[in-house]
Image (tube, helix red, strand yellow):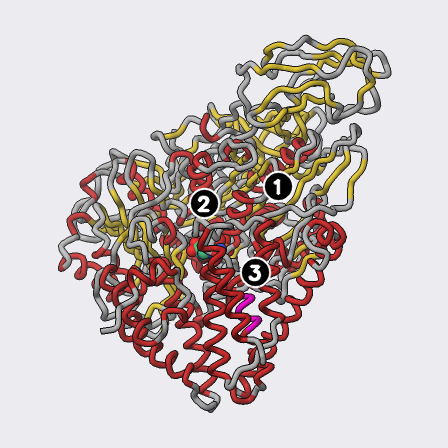
Amino acid sequence: MIKAYNRITNIIGDIAELDAKDVSFNELAQVTNHNGETSLAQVIRMDGDRVSLQVFAGAKGLSNGAKVRFLGHPMTVHHSDALLGRIFNGSGVPMDGKPPMDESGQVDIAGPSVNPVKRIVPHNFIETRIPMIDVFNPLVESQKLPIFSQAGEPYNELLARVGLQAQADVIVLGGIGLKFDEYIFFRQTFEEGGVMDRTVMFVHTAADPVVERLLVPDLALAVAEQFGVQGKRVLVLLTDMTAFADALKEINVAMEQVPSNLGYPGSLYSDLAARYEKAVDFKGAGSITVLAVTTMPGGDVTHPVPDNTGYITEGQYYLDTGMINPFGSLSRLKQLVIDSVTREDHGAVMNSMIRLYARAQETKKKLAMGFEVTEQDEKYLKYADLFVDRFMDLRVDVTLEKALDNGWKTMAECFEPEEVGIKKALLEKYWPKAE
Amino acid sequence: MNQAPATRGKITGVNGNMVSVDVSEGSLIQNEVAFVNCGDERLKAEVIKIRGRQASLQVFEDTRGVRVGQDVEFSGELLSVELAPGLLGMTYDGLQNPLEHLDNRQGFFLKRGQYPPAVDQEKRWLFNPTAKPGDRVQAGSWLGWVQELHYPHQIMAPLNMLGAATVKSIVEEGEYTIRDTVAVLEDGNGREIPISMLQTWPVKKPIRAYAERLYPQEMMVTQCRIIDTFFPVGRGGVACVPGPFGAGKTVLQHILAKYAQVDIVIVVACGERAGEVVETIITFPELEDPKTGGSLMDRTIIICNTSSMPVAARDASVYTGVTLAEYYRQMGRNVLLLADSTSRWAQAMREMSGRLEEIPGEEAFPAYLESRIAGFYERGGQVRLANDETGSVTLIGTVSPAGGNFEEPVTQGTLKVVSAFHGLSRKRSDERRYPAIDPIDSWSLYLKQMEKSLNAELDPEWVPMVVECQDLLRRGSQVGRMMTVVGEEGVSQADLLDYLRSDMLDAVYLQQNAFDAVDQACSMKRQLRDFKLLVRALRTKFSFPDKPEARRFFAKLQDAFYQKNYCAEDSADYTQYETKIENLLAEGVAP
Ligand SMILES: Nc1ncnc2c1ncn2[C@@H]1O[C@H](COP(=O)(O)OP(=O)(O)O)[C@@H](O)[C@H]1O
Ligand SMILES: [Mg+2]
């Protein structure tokens, strides 16, 4: 039985409160404003008969005489192959001018976790042809990994480039607080890359209501999950998750909850984890890989959003002055593919080159203070320059194989074999022989 | 036990995973388990606040679909675990539900409201009685045993029994299920107590059925050089591993789970990634436990409440883990409990405290945070049982400080109660100096505490050598800092040599490659041999014509030590590198 009410008691932020009976937690309602505009809303608290609704379109302009109709079920999304090639907004309404999806095939959003025993250990290397990724922090199918970035860095370009290179069966883009131009950029890039017919987009632009931001990751991931269960290798791209966290903050304030850190709710970690943990390699079915963007307010990696994200995700790519920084970046799944799936010298090259580059950075710092350059220092300076040119520059586009060869070549151009800390067996096989 | 009519109530409010319940009659017990009837699902919950007729419950499941007016049943029992043979090798969620035995939605997704038995109820175990009718027993006395994988599993008098009792009867050797009665005791009041192989225990209460707690004096060998040699942990000790994300906390816990020389390992994956648990579940059955010849999984129990599983069960998971550890300690076993990460547990407390509208403390954590942390670590320890056997629970918890800053409530609260601190540093992990335990900031009180036994077992000079190396590391780091100010030309050759020595010690001994088949585990015997040779090298007085020559020499020496790490002990290559080091030392000595 569907019940309708037409008296809202309180409106605080984007939350409307009213007295209603026989409502269930997280149930969906339809709110029809005095001017006929409608929005979906979700029950987020119940206290006796007092029900708090989070209004997806926001409460701006909402009349306390608006009509509220409870729908008897939580938020769902349509799922079928007909989604491919389509673009929706943050409430699942088409924004590509095509007709809405039919009412059948609805699946719950934000559903329960995968039973850990139904997962397998990831093992497929995804070659991106970006040496800073492939050599130093390889991406693995089913990994969840954000790009940490300051405002103004080419993070969406990087996201799209990796997205196209990954050769997934299905791409799901979740745009959260995107600028209109960024939305168009993704659409064009995917059309030109020839992947639009296997892509679904859920796009919330900066002009859309803030509550809808919260839905985008859940819609995108619910759809991805269904494709994954069907055996597809799905890539989910989410940008920008900091905008998602900021929406959580707004709701938290409206709900008068005690914030833990910079106004963010104490549940920020769990809230982000509930989304990122959807990345999975299903036992006997497909997989979901999640690549996201997390912009760092003020470039501060210890800000609660990147900080909590780093604790959840399986590493991060740290984008800094247009390059992937080798120190802040990490792929936690790399050991699952390095040497076993990739070439046997991969691990050794990766570790030594990073250690040497760290030394080179120290040397630079020291020399910046005006000290005499020693013979040792010169080796490191030369190495640092070659490292930037051959590895860090984002224009470099080579296979992993080639990049590893470049690594040996670079080390040999600067150092003696006993200076690089590599096992003898590998040195004998790969150290370039002097002509 | 449950004669009083069950208390019932009706839901009056829902706020996330907290529900308020109006209880019109019957009594309420703080922390008792209740079930919320939501349609045809029964959701497990725990009473966390009682005010008048109003109870607040934390529900261990997603509360979607719960309605005001729905029925709640109170069980009268505290949140408990099942203790019986059959626990080893299992993977549980935070409430001890066996993950392999759950039904899954669409074949993959956890379905709420399922609570199957934790251990196999049908399996028949060969019971060997050891007590006789007429024996006087007390809580935890061993009555008989069954063989659980590689260890005898003691069947004990109830761990919560008050006072002494007499064995009235006990069955003959034979096969029984965990529910069969295997003995009958008679207590001081002439009441009969039937004994089966299954006990239950409320997780938030420590098991204390032992004679006394001991002062940890033996080392728990981890085969990780920097820990065993520099910051050792005693059997029954408590240690914490704080570190920013990506610094290597989880990898270190995995290393300990694999190589620590203990009987049983309990891994509590608390609010962290599911993928990490999966690695353990899949790789451990394939790895050998050198001690028993069985698989590593045979000595392991996994408790996992991963980060997207319901938050309230996260709080339960650490207690479930430590209770199982204490249970095996009562059998005289040495147990290692690894909790990754205790910060997620603290955050679960914070979320609940917020919903209860308690007055928040620092960073919105509840005021009782510190006492809860202390209470948890106090459950570690080595004990002497009434039969003079000893057992231990060693606790090692990771901490995930916000922003990697150790000045936060969870790290600080933990540092007050642990005796070893393995602090991971961002700088070291960025430089790939793994394990990234900071050799200068970290400490272990056990080094001094165990000095006598270490010197007796390893080398009369063991602890002094370790202290000497710690001094060297400090000096090396000072010289390093000085050189960033005055340059290499600004320091004397003696200072530079200290720097090179300390750098070598770091590179070839503190660092250890977790992903190399040989280097990943270093036996104590090998640590002794490697460390003594290294100390000899560090003590050798060298003199070089100039600084570049010193650097060249040390590069060679360091590389020889480094290559040796990758050679199996006693292999031809290993001894060859020892000889090479000896020769280098002879060559570099000052004339
Ligand atoms: N001892 C080690 N040896 C080699 N690599 C390591 C070691 N410890 C950590 N790492 C690397 O660092 C990554 C992050 O480590 P992890 O233990 O997951 O960090 P944390 O739990 O502190 O966030 C690992 O995936 C691995 O690549
Ligand atoms: Mg970890």
Q: Going by the image, does A284 lie left or right of A46?
A: left
The residues tagged by marks 2 and 1 sit, at their Cα atoms, a distance apart of 18 Å
Q: Residue B575's x, y, as percent?
A: 49, 56
Image quadrant where one finds the N terminus of chain A? top left
Residue highlighted by disc 2: B276
Q: Is mark 1 within 8 Å of ligand 1?
A: no
| Residue B351 appears in the rendering | no
N-term-proximal mark, 3 vs 2: 2
Name the residue rendered at 51%, 70% in the picture: B584
Q: Residue B238's x, y, as percent?
A: 67, 49
Instruction: Give residue B437's mark.
Output: 3
Q: Secondary structure at mark 1?
A: strand
Residue highlighted by disc 1: B336
Q: Quadrant of residue B225?
A: bottom right
Label 3 packing within 10 angstroms: few (<14), some (14-19), many (20+): many
The residues tagged by marks 3 and 2 sit, at their Cα atoms, a distance apart of 21 Å
Magenta residues span B501-507
Subunit of label 1? B
Subunit of label 3? B
Subunit of label 2? B
Kind of residue at disc 2: Glu
Residue B504 covered by magenta stretch: yes
